[in-house]
Amino acid sequence: MVFCNVPDEATAQHIAHVLVQEQLAACVNILPACRSVYIWEGALQESREIPLLIKTTEAVYAALEQRLHALHPYDVPEIIALPVSQGLPAYLTWVSQAVLSRDGAQQEQ
């Protein structure tokens, strides 16, 4: 599972569609907007962002990170991978089958 905030709905839609179409993600949830408070370049910032929950596998994480970074408009986007330790086996199998393996073939499980 990868978590990433983007600046607006249009960016969220674009990234979600690309990642799923390119089989780097099985599913991307576009969540309601949130407010983020952070320090950037020495100044306190507050901005509205759209969170994305990206369902993928460890096998394609590096490719997903590279593509997500290229698509993202921020210089330093928040791209955080969280391990999935458990889940409904049928759902986890579907995720594995929906994304590509490192060699470009669909994964078997």
Image: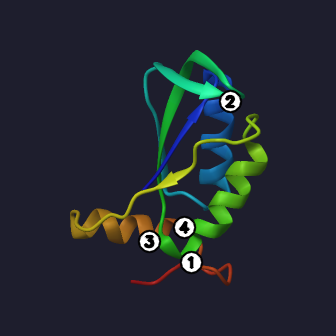
Image quadrant containing the C terminus: bottom left
Q: Pinpoint residue 20: horizontal percent, then vertical percent.
A: 59, 52
The residue to which callout 3 is attached is 96
Q: Earlier in the sequence, mark 1 or mark 2?
A: 2
Callout 4 touching callout 3 (CB < 8 Å): yes
Q: Secondary structure at mark 4?
A: loop
- Name which residue lies at 72% across and 56% down: 67
The disc at residue 11 is: 2
Q: Pinpoint residue 15: horizontal percent, then vertical percent.
A: 66, 41
Q: Amino acid at mark 4?
A: Val
Q: Is residue 45 left or right of residue 32?
A: right
Q: Residues within 10 Å of mark 1 (few under 14, many from 20)?
A: some
The residue to which callout 1 is attached is 106
Q: Earlier in the sequence, mark 3 or mark 1?
A: 3
The residue to which callout 4 is attached is 99
Q: Secondary structure at mark 2?
A: helix
Q: Is residue 20 left or right of residue 54?
A: right
- Name which residue lies at 49% across and 72% down: 58
Q: Pinpoint residue 23: horizontal percent, then vertical percent.
A: 61, 62
CA distance for labels 2 and 3: 25 Å
Q: Pinpoint residue 95: horizontal percent, then vertical percent.
A: 42, 64
CA distance for labels 4 and 3: 6 Å
Callout 1 touching callout 4 (CB < 8 Å): yes
